[in-house]
Image (spheres, rainbow, N blue to C red):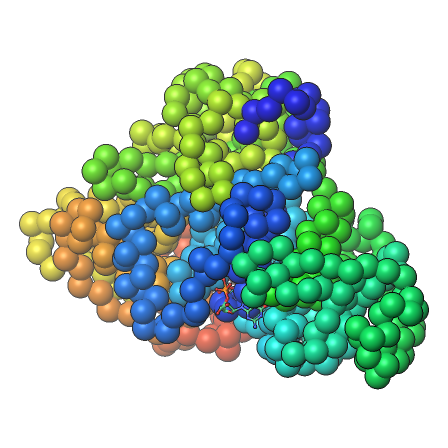
Amino acid sequence: MADDKFSFTQEVERRRTFAIISHPDAGKTTLTEKFLLYGGAIRSAGSVKSRRSQKHAVSDWMEIEKQRGISVTSSVMQFEYDDFCINILDTPGHQDFSEDTYRTLMAADSAVMVIDCSKGVEDQTKKLFQVCKLRGIPIFTFINKMDRMGRDPFDLLEDIEKVLDIKSCPMNWPIGSGKDFKGVYNRYDNQIELFMDGNHGQSIAKAVKGQLGDEKFNPLIGHDLHEQLLGEIELLDIAGDHFDQKEVLKGNLTPVFFGSALTNFGVEPFLQSFLDMTPPPLARLSNQGNIDPKSENFTGFIFKIQANMNPAHRDRIAFLRICSGQFDKGMTVNHVQKGKKVKLAQPQQFVAQDRVVVDSAYPGDIIGIHDPGIFNIGDTLCKDASKIEYAGIPQFAPEHFARISTVNSLKRKQFLKGVTQLAEEGAIQVYRRPNMGVEELIIGVVGVLQFEVLEYRLKHEYGVELSMQQLPYRYLRWIEQDSYDVTKLALPMDTVLVENKHQQPVLLFQNEWSIKHILDRNEGIVLKEHS
Ligand code: GDP
């Protein structure tokens, strides 16, 4: 949002762009909502309904599809808190887990990892964490649901360190847990912060603050809990890793906070510390070296494309992460990869829960631009003629595969058009057997819901009825160019050789054993997980 109150430099420095990652149900949506509550973007919390059953998730998705606006507004959100301008990127963790989820992390400068205190680190958190690690962005941990009985906090720290292989530093420590969760002890200023009920989490929780050892806390905490806290604090000083901002910024050390998103206990202290520690937009690597976000030249890259957001208009929106310079509505920019000029006429931004047309935007912001079919994931837009290109967005290996064809062969053209569109959006990857015609394709997806998305969208947007047969493959590896003559490959029975859209050879495996088998039997072959 443009605001004359701030200079361009201040606009950049006050931006914080981060993704929230978690396993389904850990409380990501609730925490996001509470951030909006504390930022004043919503007046009362409580729109997060209790978790729906898995069975319903698919039809929910279709409902969401009918009102695409909603699913989009929830994927990027901007709000203000304490002069910070915050962009939250949602990474769907539910069944709609897809490549989009991974790519979104390419647009974030840091990540907040939400962990359920009764579960510890779960599968999807692990996967998303690995992508953050790949990028080397800072990761902040919020251990949620402390109002419920959970695992021992020391255990949880160990879990994070062991499962994720990252050092951790507790920034605060819970005082009690379950029904007795009363507040947190902030280690950096030795302050105790006790929370009062914020109307079951609907409004901001009031807090009483004071130094550790202050007698006023005795009746509030109780003698036993106080003693326990003092003992645990002593242990922490010996056990935990020391805080080191440099290590945090490199993604080697995660600061850990305890709280309850539902009751709001610990949410604001977390938000405040997190905003202080997490960096504003930093220089980003391009083919011309690091680009300073404060440089005058406007640049950005596309990390997500979504088509037919409004079925009445058949529109296509490309999501652009601004990396440097100021964006102004209606500006003409160079599409570096296509070598063309493009006017960005109706840029949209996603403020709290609404979509608005934006006049100005700054590095760190995400804007949605109309795409007449000219953008691809990873494309760079650039104001001047410098032809800056940002490092490409890696392609993540699909884990589920199916063979598809159209039921009605007269619809072949539509079938190909729809499949191509979804592949361009990055929702699916398309492969073919070297000797197979285009009537039958193999598609790969990161999350199984994408199969249903494909079926649904081909039917509703392209009038094509699909025949689909899921295949037993689980692993994909690219054969590094020129590393091997594929005609000489000795393949085990359960492995298949296909070609991707660039006619590169790709292998699909059913298990890790077969990958090892290929490596053992075909000397010199180089298999890659990321393209
Ligand atoms: P997401 O799937 O990670 O987005 O999780 P949600 O935010 O939808 O939360 C999943 C469920 O956990 C919902 O029923 C929430 O009300 C509940 N929940 C979220 N945070 C807390 C918390 O701090 N304490 C408790 N007891 N429940 C919570």
Location of the N terminus (image quadrant): top right
- Answer above or below: position of 520 versus 463: below
Place of residue 302 in the rendered image (x, y in percent of width and height, measured from the top left):
48, 36
Image quadrant assignment for residue 162: bottom right
Name the residue rendered at 57%, 50% in the picture.
Answer: 37
Place of residue 4 in the rendered image (x, y in percent of width and height, measured from the top left):
62, 20
Which residue extends farthest bottom?
224
Between residues 205 and 185, which one lies in front from this camera angle? Answer: 205
Between residues 344 and 287, which one lies in front from this camera angle? Answer: 344
**Side (left or right) of 517 relative to 180:** left
Q: Determine if residue 388 is in view.
A: no
Between residues 372 and 365, which one lies in front from this camera angle? Answer: 365
Image quadrant assignment for residue 220: bottom right
Name the residue rendered at 39%, 25% in the picture.
Answer: 346
Q: Determine if residue 472 is in view.
A: yes
**Side (left or right) of 22 relative to 9:** left
Place of residue 97 in the rendered image (x, y in percent of width and height, measured from the top left):
43, 60
Place of residue 306 in the rendered image (x, y in percent of width and height, measured from the top left):
36, 43
Name the residue rendered at 45%, 44% in the picture.
Answer: 353
Between residues 39 and 140, which one lies in front from this camera angle? Answer: 39
Image quadrant assignment for residue 469: bottom left
**Side (left or right) of 362 relative to 451:** right
